[in-house]
Image (cartoon, rainbow, N blue to C red):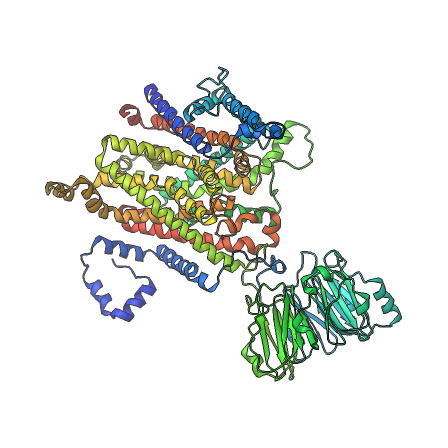
């Protein structure tokens, strides 16, 4: 198992380097010149030749003349800067956000908390609903309830999440007035203690979490259902039933363990899509999260911020796939042996 | 065994092939090619057939629709913003029919008085959520109204005793009478009003003595009448923010004080020395009819206001709408010209036959009253699906948006399929290092967070591109990011197929390996490929619309089903302007659901094992 995890870790490092290099190169396609931007205020007070010389010096000292790969390594923090210090992502320097006039680390802090909170919440909620629902539908295949769920799941994964969000806003905020339309806290509210603050935040993110959960119900329920049906049609299930094993044991012990494998694989894609989907949700509900920040950064051409958030998304997806790989190894002994 | 076929198919078959076709099929179970089995399985699934037919209807609708509802990307009409769906803007209330005394044509509504002095309103009378023209004040209801005029957002009425009433939007001084007016009103001197007009936030009244009173929002309109014209005015007409007047001696003048700077103030030389009998204005132009039957148009001509059609006789009266003119000729015919985007310059045939007594024209509306009391109306009837915040017809935008969304979806699926088939085919057939390399690349691309990555690609590359080029960019980005599923599918299929006998046979005949993959194996997996293409099509449409919704897809003003919903995520739009999000969301939702139903049905038909699921 240890060797298997190491192998996956090594693979993830390679992927991380490829993706980050790709992103960095893409980012460098944007015509921007920090040296010229920094000199612009003094430009009029200098002679052209003097300005040119100073500009070239500044470019050199900022390391802008170095080849792409060196700049990339410096940005990661695995190659020393001009002054001989390591100062990159691995040292905790994610760059400077022009739009917020703050270090990216400072800008990202609280949105990241919100995003992770929302995503974990809706992941747990979605799994808690879809797995029992999928199993129930598979066991009662072809019944009325199964057919109804089938229709609802098709609706769930066909309709884009922002339309679901609009409908939910209309029903819950406009018609019923149960939830607030946007934001993460009641404006102008003073909290007596942190518990109150937490409850207020829960109240505000309830609707986004419900929408996200609802949006991911469709796909997941179908996966669970179809892999469970596959597992239930196997010979060993017939054998178990023939032996007189209780139906509950057959379903939850014999069939579900085997149905879990394809479900886990599909969770990878789903876990990623939930983070991507939160870009849409956070914008629709104007929540202060990573997705909203990413959108703001892109709209204001604040690319250091965008790059840092993009790296966050990449790391999340890689960690997610590592997590899946490990649990795959735990569930299926064959994986550990073969690889 | 054989189930009943879908009724349309059944009818079709009976109609063209006779009932014998059915019985033949019933008597013996035929040997069928796999394609025919698939087709039969597909037809037997009701949900899939429903999906197919609805999708085809939507497809035809968005492909043929743009030829009937042509889109003008630069279009915006400030007087038609956020209109609710309706078709009743020209529908006179039945109580008014036959006894019309005066009609005021508003931008999206009408106000009329009958011969007894009662006031009626019709059409879309809502100005804002609080202000509604149909809330006629009680004193107007009780008064005996003789004259009526309607502006952008207010209405003016005059009763028999010379009292003037203003209602509707009065927040911008629409009801603030000037001092000489109030004086005249009190004394009753110079206050025998013969003409009443209203326009964008200002209004005017003319007394029989020739004194013109203008009042309203001074910031918007030039309402200071030059003293030398007072007492000398025979008729006046209001444009969007100016006033033109016809003097008693037959000359046309710019009545306001800022005439020297205004293009309308430069009276054309063609009118010099001629006696003008009638004038009319649109929002930006003026038209004058001379004694000898000539019509001269000047001002800011943008929508063909000066394209005067050939006339059978001399014009006697002329009326102006927002961007069109209507004229009545000596022999009783009625002619309209100018902007015809809502049919306001297309006089119906009935009007030409009837004997017309009065014509009322304003904004995009025309009403003609015959001597027998019948009323004919032409012009803007309303919008079936309402309008958006720039006054654009939602129906036109939904149809054209659907075409763009489907086009982008289709082309990105084709790109993704080509990449997926080539890479998957190579990986599956050659195996070994090629396989490992391709599958690792697929894993990386598939592992990228899709929407953020597409957003950054569109933002970085798209910032330098033209809107059309940006559309192609989105197609390529979607295609390049979504080929991994197809690649995996093709690879897995080829791994299974290459063990089959027919591949061995082909190899034994010495056929080249590449040819075996693409010419022998691929046709055998084409049905599965079709399934994945169908499902991917829905996914690509969803992704495109999501990107456009976030503002990183197809840029405005080109409509797509995604960016139609861009401004919809605030509670005001969701609640008050529901038609701006309900219709695009509904048709888009229906379309993707149908494509997915179709894809699911197709997969069930292709894969016999999944039939049991």
Q: In this view, does B114 lie to the left or right of B420?
A: right
Q: Which of A137 and B83 is in front in this view?
A: B83
Residue B91 appears in the figure: no
What percent of the width, then of the height, locates residue A9? 37, 23
Q: Nearer the viewer, residue B99 or A141?
A: B99
- Residue shown at the point (47%, 54%) measured from the top left: B401
Quadrant of residue B256 within the rendered picture:
bottom right
Q: In this view, does A259 lie to the left or right of B92?
A: left
User: Going by the picture, which residue comes out furthest to the top?
Assistant: A84
Q: Is residue B60 above or below residue B416?
A: below
Residue B329 appears in the figure: yes
Q: Is residue B343 left or right of residue A257?
A: right
Q: Which of A101 and B431 is in front in this view?
A: A101
What percent of the width, then of the height, locates residue B56? 38, 59
What percent of the width, then of the height, locates residue B294? 63, 77
- Residue shown at the point (26%, 59%) measured from the top left: B2
What percent of the width, then of the height, locates residue B543? 44, 44
Q: Is residue B126 left or right of residue A166?
A: right
Q: In this view, does B517 lie above or below B349?
A: above
Quadrant of residue B357 within the rendered picture:
bottom right
Q: Nearer the viewer, residue A3 or A111?
A: A111
Q: Is residue A161 above or below residue B272?
A: above
Quarter of the figure that contains the N terminus of chain B: bottom left
Q: Tally the numbered discs.
A: 0
């Amino acid at each position: 198992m240890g060797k298997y995890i190491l192998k996956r870790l090594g693979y993830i490092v390679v992927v991380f380097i490829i993706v980050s290099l790709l992103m960095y190169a893409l980012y460098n396609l944007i015509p921007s010149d920090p040296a010229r931007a920094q000199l612009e205020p003094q430009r009029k007070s200098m002679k052209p030749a003097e300005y040119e010389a100073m500009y070239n010096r500044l470019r050199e000292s900022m390391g802008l003349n170095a080849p792409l790969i060196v700049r990339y390594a410096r940005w990661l923090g695995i190659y020393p800067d001009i002054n001989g210090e390591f100062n990159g992502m691995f040292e905790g320097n994610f760059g400077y956000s022009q739009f917020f006039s703050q270090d990216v680390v400072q800008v990202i802090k609280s949105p990241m908390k919100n995003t992770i909170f929302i995503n974990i919440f809706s992941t747990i909620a979605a799994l808690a609903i879809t797995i029992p629902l999928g199993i129930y539908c598979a066991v009662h295949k072809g019944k009325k309830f199964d057919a109804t769920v089938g229709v609802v799941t098709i609706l769930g994964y066909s309709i884009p999440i922002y339309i679901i969000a609009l409908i939910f806003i209309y029903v819950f905020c406009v018609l019923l007035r149960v939830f607030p339309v946007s934001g993460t806290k009641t404006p102008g509210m003073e909290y007596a203690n942190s518990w109150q603050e937490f409850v207020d935040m829960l109240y505000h993110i309830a609707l986004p979490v419900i929408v996200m959960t609802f949006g991911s119900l469709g796909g997941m329920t179908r996966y669970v259902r179809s892999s469970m049906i596959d597992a239930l049609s196997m010979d060993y299930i017939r054998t178990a039933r023939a032996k007189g094993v209780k139906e509950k044991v057959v379903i939850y012990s014999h069939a579900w363990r085997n149905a879990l494998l394809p479900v886990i694989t599909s969770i990878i894609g789903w876990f990623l899509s939930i983070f991507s989907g939160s870009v849409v949700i956070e914008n629709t509900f104007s929540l202060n999260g990573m997705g909203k920040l990413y959108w703001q950064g892109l709209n204001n051409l604040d690319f250091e911020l965008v790059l840092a958030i993009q790296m966050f998304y990449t790391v999340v997806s890689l960690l997610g796939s590592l997590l899946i790989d490990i649990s795959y190894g735990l569930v299926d002994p064959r994986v550990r042996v073969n690889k | 065994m054989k189930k009943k076929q879908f009724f349309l198919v059944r009818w079709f078959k009976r109609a063209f092939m006779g009932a014998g076709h059915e019985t033949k099929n019933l008597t013996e179970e035929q040997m069928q090619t796999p394609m025919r089995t698939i087709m039969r399985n597909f037809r037997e699934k009701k949900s899939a057939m429903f999906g197919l037919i609805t999708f085809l209807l939507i497809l035809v609708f968005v492909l043929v629709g743009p030829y009937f509802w042509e889109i003008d990307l630069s279009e915006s009409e400030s007087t038609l913003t956020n209109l609710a769906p309706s078709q009743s803007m020209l529908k006179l209330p039945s109580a008014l029919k036959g006894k019309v005394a005066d009609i005021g044509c508003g931008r999206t509504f009408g106000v009329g008085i009958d011969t007894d002095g009662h006031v009626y309103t019709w059409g879309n009378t809502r100005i804002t959520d609080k202000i509604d023209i149909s809330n006629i004040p009680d004193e107007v209801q009780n008064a005996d109204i003789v004259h009526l005029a309607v502006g952008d957002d207010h209405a003016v009425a005059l009763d028999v005793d010379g009292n003037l009433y203003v209602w509707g939007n009065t927040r911008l001084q629409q009801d603030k009478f000037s001092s000489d007016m109030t004086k005249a009103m009190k004394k009753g001197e110079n206050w025998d009003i013969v003409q009443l007009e209203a326009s964008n936030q200002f209004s005017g009244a003319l007394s029989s003595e020739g004194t013109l009173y203008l009042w309203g929002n001074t910031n918007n309109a030039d309402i200071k009448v030059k003293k030398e014209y007072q007492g000398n005015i025979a008729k006046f007409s209001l444009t969007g923010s100016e006033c033109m007047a016809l003097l008693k001696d037959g000359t046309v003048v710019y009545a306001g004080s800022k005439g020297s700077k205004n293009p309308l103030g430069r009276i054309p030389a063609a009118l010099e020395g001629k006696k003008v009998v009638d004038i009319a204005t649109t929002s930006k132009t003026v038209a004058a009819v001379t004694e000898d039957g000539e019509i001269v148009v000047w001002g800011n001509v943008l929508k063909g206001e000066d394209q005067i059609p050939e006339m059978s006789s001399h014009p006697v009266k002329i009326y102006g709408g927002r961007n069109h003119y209507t004229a009545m000729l000596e022999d009783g015919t009625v002619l309209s010209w100018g902007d015809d985007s809502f049919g306001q310059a297309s006089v119906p045939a009935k009007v030409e036959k009837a004997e017309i007594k009065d014509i009322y024209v304003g904004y995009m509306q025309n009403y003609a009253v015959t001597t027998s009391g019948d009323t004919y109306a032409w012009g803007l009837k309303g919008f079936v699906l309402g309008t958006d915040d720039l006054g654009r017809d939602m129906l036109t935008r939904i149809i054209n948006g659907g075409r763009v969304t489907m086009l982008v979806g289709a082309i990105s699926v084709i790109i993704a399929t080509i990449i997926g088939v080539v890479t998957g085919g190579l990986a599956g057939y050659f195996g070994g290092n090629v396989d490992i390399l391709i599958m690792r690349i697929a894993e990386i691309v598939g592992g990228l967070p899709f929407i953020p990555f597409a957003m950054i690609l569109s933002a970085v590359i798209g910032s330098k591109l033209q809107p059309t080029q940006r559309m192609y960019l989105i197609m390529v980005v979607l295609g390049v990011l979504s080929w991994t599923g197809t690649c995996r599918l093709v690879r897995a299929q080829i791994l299974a197929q290459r063990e089959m006998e027919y591949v061995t046979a082909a190899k034994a005949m010495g056929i080249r390996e590449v040819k075996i993959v693409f010419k022998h194996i691929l046709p055998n997996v084409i049905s599965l490929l079709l399934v994945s293409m169908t499902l991917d099509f829905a996914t690509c449409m969803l992704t495109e619309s999501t990107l456009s919704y976030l503002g990183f897809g197809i840029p405005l003003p080109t409509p797509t089903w995604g960016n139609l919903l861009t401004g919809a995520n605030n509670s005001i739009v969701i609640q008050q302007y529901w038609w701006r999000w309900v219709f695009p969301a509904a048709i888009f939702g229906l379309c993707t659901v149908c494509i997915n139903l179709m894809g699911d049905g197709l997969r069930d038909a292709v894969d016999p094992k999944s039939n049991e699921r």
